[in-house]
Structure formats: structure tokens, C-alpha cells
Amino acid sequence: MNISPFLSVGQSCDETLQWTKGQLLQANFRFVQTFDLHAARVGLRDCSCPNHGTDACGCQMVVLLVYGKSAEPATLFLHGNDGQTWLSIADDPHQRADAKFLQAIRQALESDLSTRVSPGQ
């Protein structure tokens, strides 16, 4: 599976998640949040961060399934740490969303570039 960021946002993952949800709703997309790293780590002990090497790090990852008119969703990842968040759409041969749908998601999220986000690599 290829997960390459297409946007970089200069905000925490939690702030970016709220903004992302608003942008998706405004574009008439539905979504379901299927994963939250903070929630998944709640009961774990001795789970050190690969980026920071400590139990108490600021890393966060959230996964959203985004739905348009078709039944097949796109998988949107938000990964953040140290006040920066990267957005990626999964590119997996086993879960192929329509290319026009993926482009529409990207456009919905890139529409506010001047105040929130900058193009990612």
C-alpha cells in the first residue's frame, strides 16, 4: 500500500481533523472515523514512540473512510506530530476508489490552501 502525503498542515492533528471534517461535509462527502492512535494507546504501557522514544509523545494518527456517491470509500490518513499534520489517501490495489472521487477529495481539502495548508510531497 502506498501512503504518500498530498497535504501538509501547520496545525496539530486534532485541529486538522476538525478542519478536515468540515471541508468534507461542505463538499457533501460522508465519512466514518475508523481509527484514533490516542484511543488505541490508552491501555498500553511501555509503548514507546518510534519518533520520540517515549511513552508520552504528541504523535497522532486518524483514519477516515470517506464516501461519495459510490459504495466504495477512500481511506484518508491524518498523521501528525510536533504541530504538523500530513494528509494521505491510501493507494491500494485491493481498495480502488474512483480516480475522479479521489481528485474531488483532494480538491475539497486543498481549497483552503492560503490559510491552513501547504502542498505536501
Image: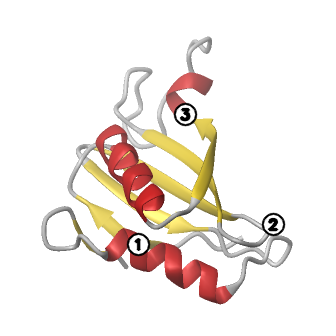
The answer to which of 88 and 68 lies nearer the viewer is 68
Residue 3 in the image, given as x and y percentages of width and height: 58, 69
In the displayed structure, would residue 48 be above or below residue 9?
A: above
Task: Name the image quarter holding the N terminus.
Answer: bottom right
CB under 8 Å between discs 2 and 3 = no
The answer to which of 85 and 46 lies nearer the viewer is 85
CB under 8 Å between discs 1 and 3 = no
In the displayed structure, would residue 71 be above or below residue 84?
A: below
- Element at badge 3? helix
**Residue pointed to by mark 1:** 108
Q: Is residue 26 left or right of residue 102?
A: left
Q: Given the image, on which type of amino acid does mark 3 rest?
A: Leu
- Element at badge 2? loop
Residue 31 in the image, given as x and y percentages of width and height: 61, 51
Q: Given the image, on which type of amino acid does mark 2 rest?
A: Ala
Look at 29% across and 42% down and name the residue there: 15
Q: Which labelled disc corresponds to residue 37?
A: 3
Residue 54 in the image, given as x and y percentages of width and height: 40, 25
**Residue pointed to by mark 2:** 71
Q: Is residue 27 left or right of residue 29?
A: left
Q: Residues within 10 Å of mark 1 (few under 14, many from 20)?
A: some
